[in-house]
Image (tube, grey):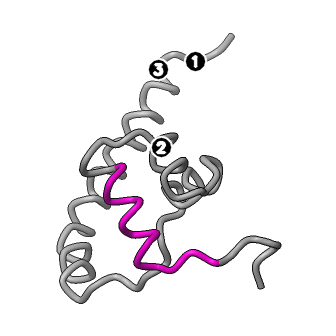
Amino acid sequence: MPRGHPAVSKEVKLQIIKRIRDDAVPVAQVASEYGISTKTIYRWLGTGVTTPPSVLEVARLKREKPGLKGTARRTDHGAVSREKKGGCS
């Protein structure tokens, strides 16, 4: 239940986020236009609007996953190698 403010529909949230990300409209301007605090909009931008990912997005992420694991291992290994070489006295 909202705390004294009317709930904003998912469609409006998506529209606001799209205007900020795609059209580069300042957060303060959009907040003023919709009567929403900038803090609320920044929270939406940080967490996103909770909608389940599409089937295509899930498939794309699964294809990328093996490549990302290899990159992470190489990075971790490199960090460990540098740490051992530097050594503390």
The nearer-to-camera label among 3 and 2 is: 2
Q: CA distance from mark 1 to mark 3?
A: 6 Å
Q: Quadrant of residue 64?
A: bottom left
Crowd band around label 3 with a 10 angstrom C-alpha radius: few (<14), some (14–19), many (20+): few
Element assignment for label 2: helix
State the residue position of label 2: 27
State the residue position of label 3: 85
Vertical side of 75 occupied by 89: above or below:
above
Q: Position of residue 29 (x, y in %)?
A: 46, 42
**Given the current orientation, which residue lies at the most extreme right position?**
3
- In front here: 80 or 48? 48
Magenta segment, which residues? Answer: 7-20
State the residue position of label 1: 87
- In front here: 53 or 65? 53
Residue 30's tag is none
Vertical side of 63 occupied by 79: above or below:
above
Identify the residue at image location x=76%, y=78%: 2
- Quadrant containing the N terminus is bottom right
Tell whether 67 sits left or right of 2.
Answer: left
**Given the current orientation, which residue lies at the most extreme top position?**
89
Q: Is residue 40 magenta?
A: no
Main secondary structure type of the part rendered in magenta:
helix
- In front here: 84 or 31? 31
Q: Position of residue 25 (x, y in %)?
A: 34, 42
Identify the residue at image location x=63%, y=56%: 40
Element assignment for label 3: helix
Q: CA distance from mark 1 to mark 2?
A: 47 Å
The nearer-to-camera label among 1 and 2 is: 2
- Quadrant containing the C terminus is top right
Q: Are marks 1 and 3 in contact (CB under 8 Å)?
A: yes
